Structure formats: structure tokens, C-alpha cells
Amino acid sequence: MDKFYYVYVLLSERDGKFYIGYTDDLKKRLNDHNKGKVPSTKNRTPLKLVYYEASLNQQDATKRERQLKTTWGGRFIKSRLEQYLAPMR
């Protein structure tokens, strides 16, 4: 079985902002974020997984992570989650 690498988007329920990252174990990473084990999000919990993509290799996942962290990527995420985010406005 192939190993997957995940690019994921979390939504902070505290500040309403996104966090974008990548991992090879999505459940564990989400758990780590919500337990405050990740320095960049420890003060932004609780965090909700709102989007993810799977890649078959780490290089593709890190490239996609960098893309999503750009201005274009932010627009893509907001557009992709338009219906989900609508009630929050």
C-alpha cells in the first residue's frame, strides 16, 4: 500500500483564521495541533480540519503546501470552502 502525504487546512475556532500544513499522518497531526503540541497553533485551539489533499510523495505535498500559502492559495481555499464559510460571515 502506498504512503500518502497530506496537505491540510485547519480553521481556528478562536480567531477564525486558517493554518496550512502537511503531514504523513493526518489524524495524529490534527490531534497534536489540538493538544497544543504545535508551537504555531498552540494559542489558536480548538482547530477544525476543513480541507485536505493527498499526494503520493512528499515533494508534491510540500510544493502544494507552498502554493496554498500564497495569496492565490488563500483565494483558492476561500473559494473552495465558500458554502462552508458562508454562515460564518
Image (tube, rainbow, N blue to C red):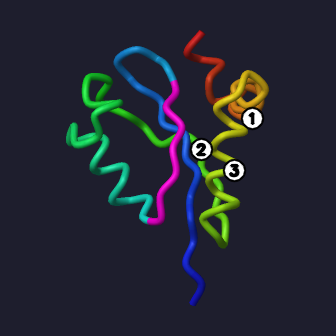
Foreground residue, 38 or 53? 38
Q: Quadrant of residue 20?
A: top right
- Residue lying at 57% horizontally and 90% vertically, measured from the top left: 1
The amino acid type found where label 2 is placed reads Tyr
- Please identify the dominant SS of the magenta region: strand
**In this view, 50 is above or below 69:** below
SS for callout 3: helix
In the image as oriented, which residue stretches furthest toward the top?
89
The crowding category of the residue bearing disc 1, from other C-alpha atoms within 10 Å (few below 14, some 14 to 19, many at least 20), is few
Instruction: Check contact, mark 3 vs mark 1: CB within 8 A.
Output: no
Work out whether mark 3 precedes mark 1 in sequence or the reverse, and give the earlier one: 3
Foreground residue, 76 or 56? 56
The amino acid type found where label 3 is placed reads Lys
Give the quarter of the figure containing the C terminus: top right
SS for callout 2: strand
The mark tally for this picture is: 3
Position of residue 30 measured from the top left corner of the image (x, y, whole percent): 37, 49
Work out whether mark 1 precedes mark 2 in sequence or the reverse, and give the earlier one: 2
Residue 80 tag number? 1
Instruction: Check contact, mark 1 vs mark 2: CB within 8 A.
Output: yes
Instruction: Check contact, mark 2 vs mark 3: CB within 8 A.
Output: no
Q: Position of 75 compared to 50: left or right?
A: right
- Residue lying at 68% horizontally and 36% vertically, measured from the top left: 68
Front disc: 3 or 1? 3
**In this view, 58 is above or below 80:** below
Instruction: Identify the residue under disc 3.
Output: 63
SS for callout 1: helix
Position of residue 9 measured from the top left corner of the image (x, y, whole percent): 55, 39
- Residue lying at 59% horizontally and 84% vertically, measured from the top left: 2
Instruction: Identify the residue under disc 2.
Output: 51
- Residue lying at 40% horizontally and 14% vertically, measured from the top left: 15
